[in-house]
């Protein structure tokens, strides 16, 4: 932490990781936060509970301090003044805001401190770093002037295709479909986002996050790779699960290249073996993609590579970490070498087949998967009811469907706290996507048994013909 400051009027404590200049903060993300207290009850740091949307490279500055660290297993970011165990960890009611610069680097953190935490005793440990709060900030937004959200210039976006791409004649292109398949939770969606450098698929630590195939399109001079991120193949226990598996399996016959993804930190399971056999029967090139090399093997010292190799005949194998972006250039060049000749199949500036409304609904589901436990997030389906572009913000109303009254109670939480937490995290993701403020209005409805009800599945958009 480089310095901190306190805005007593707003009740905000700022931690900054570099000398900020006006206009440097271009975006924000919100996460639950906790104060770290020493035995005297003084604040010596904070813990912020991140989700998978924050990638390690964004935390370069935040982790630069000698006592700051990321507990990768839980996604907990610790910003600390000293290397000591907290005597107490106190939950804050309001989420912390991560300030991002134009390159999405986290440059600071804002914590909403209730008044009782703003006493000299509580702040004693921070005093050496405390700089006066500028009470006449230019835009009235704290010590930093928040730049306006990135304004999407539609005309400029139209011209986003670099002229050198547009100039390549169709017969000189190569293009093809690359299926990312594997059991749930091996990191298929994380890989898709990492390869595209954009978030087009939601990610969560829970299995069965992806429900329908998502296309991500990577266009480079002379080649267009259409990645298909698929739902994890598993043994389904309801109609929705059956559809997810069917949609994943249907991508296999048409794929030019199949990336069979596995988690190298764990031994192959029955599902890995079954999926490997399905992949073997397909016509496309077969790559064995061993993900999560950054993670220690489940049994210390174990090497599961030979066991995965034996699951089939592979054109090649490659070890990667989708999360830490290791091995991706090598993977891309192997895929690229196996693309058939053919003209681009999508417009040169398109990166996904999903529209903003679908993505916004997915962001809400992602946050629900992150914050809720056990079966509840899996019983959620989101409908976008209204989407109105107003002068200063986009108004979005969504209904979150659950299957039982008890799930509705859990989703709303005590005093509406859980729904608020999910909504505020989702709003910040949607604002980043749209580049403008969003007013997100969430409603919860019980639709008994929708995951096994063909007509409910249909109107919620989960029908096979939508994805053919
Ligand atoms: N350590 C580590 N974790 C990873 C890596 N790639 C993905 N993960 C984590 O694995 C979990 C699952 O990632 P997803 O990308 O949602 O997995 P998926 O295969 O798409 O899962 P489904 O959609 O359920 O089939 C998330 O918590 C990711 O952060 C990696 O390279 N290393
Ligand atoms: Mg997925």
Image (spheres, grey):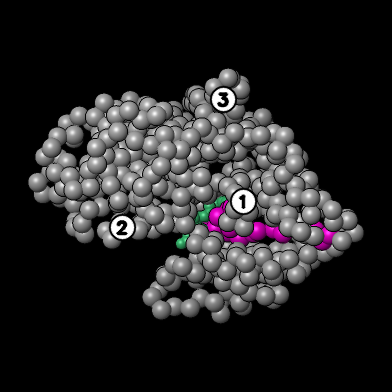
Q: CA distance from mark 3 to mark 2?
A: 38 Å
Q: CA distance from mark 2 to mark 1?
A: 39 Å
Which residue is rendered at x = 27% and y = 43% of the image? 4
Name the spot of residue 302 as percent of width and height, x first: 44, 78
Q: Earlier in the sequence, mark 3 or mark 1?
A: 1
Determine which residue is flagged by label 3: 394
Q: Residues within 10 Å of mark 3 (few under 14, many from 20)?
A: some
Q: From this viewpoint, is residue 413 visible? A: no
Q: Is residue 275 above or below residue 107?
A: below
Kindly report which numbered mark, 3 or 1, lies closer to the viewer in this rendering.
Answer: 3
Determine which residue is flagged by label 1: 231
Residue bounds of the magenta highlight: 173-193
Name the spot of residue 443 as percent of width and height, x first: 49, 24
* Residue 270 belongs to magenta span: no
Kindly report which numbered mark, 2 or 1, lies closer to the viewer in this rendering.
Answer: 2
Does the closest atom of ligand 1 sit within 8 Å of the Cβ of label 1? yes
Q: Is residue 271 above or below residue 356?
A: below
Q: From this viewpoint, is residue 357 visible? A: yes
Which residue is rendered at x = 60% and y = 28% of the image? 384
Q: Is residue 49 left or right of residue 27?
A: left
- Which circle marks residue 65 in the picture? 2
Q: Earlier in the sequence, mark 3 or mark 2?
A: 2
Residues under numbered marks 3 and 2 in contact, where contact means CB atoms less than 8 Å apart? no
Taking depth in this image into account, of 10 and 429 the one nearest to the observer is 10
Q: Secondary structure at mark 1?
A: loop
Q: Is residue 463 above or below residue 251?
A: above
Q: CA distance from mark 3 to mark 1?
A: 30 Å
């Amino acid at each position: 932490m480089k310095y901190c400051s306190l805005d007593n009027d707003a009740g905000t404590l700022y931690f900054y990781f570099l000398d900020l200049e006006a206009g440097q903060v271009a975006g924000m993300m919100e996460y639950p936060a906790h104060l770290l207290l020493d035995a005297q009850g003084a604040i010596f740091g904070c813990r912020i509970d991140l989700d998978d949307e924050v990638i390690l490279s964004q935390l370069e500055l935040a982790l630069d301090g000698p006592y700051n660290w990321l507990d990768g297993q839980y996604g907990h970011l610790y910003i600390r003044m000293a290397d000591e165990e907290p005597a107490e960890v106190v939950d804050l009611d309001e989420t912390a805001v991560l300030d991002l610069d134009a390159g999405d680097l986290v440059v600071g953190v804002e914590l909403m401190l209730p008044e009782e935490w703003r006493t000299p005793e509580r702040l004693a440990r921070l005093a050496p770093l405390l700089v006066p709060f500028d009470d006449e900030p230019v835009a009235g937004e704290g010590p930093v002037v928040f730049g306006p959200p990135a304004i999407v210039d539609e005309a400029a976006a139209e011209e986003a295709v670099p002229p050198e791409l547009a100039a390549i004649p169709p017969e000189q292109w190569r293009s093809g479909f690359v299926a990312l398949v594997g059991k749930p939770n091996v990191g298929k969606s994380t890989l898709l986002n990492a390869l595209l450098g954009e978030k087009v698929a939601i990610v969560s630590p829970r299995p069965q996050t992806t429900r329908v195939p998502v296309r991500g399109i990577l266009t480079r001079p002379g080649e267009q790779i259409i990645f298909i991120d698929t739902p994890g193949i598993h043994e389904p226990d309801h109609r929705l699960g059956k559809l997810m598996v069917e949609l994943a399996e249907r991508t296999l016959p048409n794929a030019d290249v199949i990336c069979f993804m596995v988690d190298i930190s764990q031994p192959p399971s029955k599902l890995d073996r079954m999926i490997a056999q399905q992949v073997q029967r397909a016509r496309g090139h077969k790559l064995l993609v061993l993900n999560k090399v950054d993670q220690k093997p489940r049994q210390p010292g174990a090497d599961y590579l030979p066991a995965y190799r034996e699951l089939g005949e592979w054109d090649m194998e490659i070890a990667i970490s989708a999360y830490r972006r290791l091995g991706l250039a090598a993977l891309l060049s192997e895929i690229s070498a196996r693309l058939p000749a053919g003209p681009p199949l999508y417009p040169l500036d398109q990166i996904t087949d999903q529209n903003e409304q679908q993505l916004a609904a997915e962001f809400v589901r992602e946050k629900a998967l992150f914050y809720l436990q056990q079966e509840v997030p899996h019983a959620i389906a989101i409908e976008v009811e209204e989407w109105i572009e107003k002068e200063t913000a986009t108004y979005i109303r969504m209904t979150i469907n659950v299957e039982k009254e008890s799930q509705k109670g859990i989703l709303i939480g005590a005093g509406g706290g859980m729904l608020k937490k999910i909504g505020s995290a989702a709003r910040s993701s949607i604002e980043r996507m749209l580049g403008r403020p969003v007013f997100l209005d969430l409603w919860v409805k019980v639709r008994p048994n929708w995951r096994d009800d063909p007509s409910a599945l249909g109107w919620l958009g989960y029908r096979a013909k939508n994805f053919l």
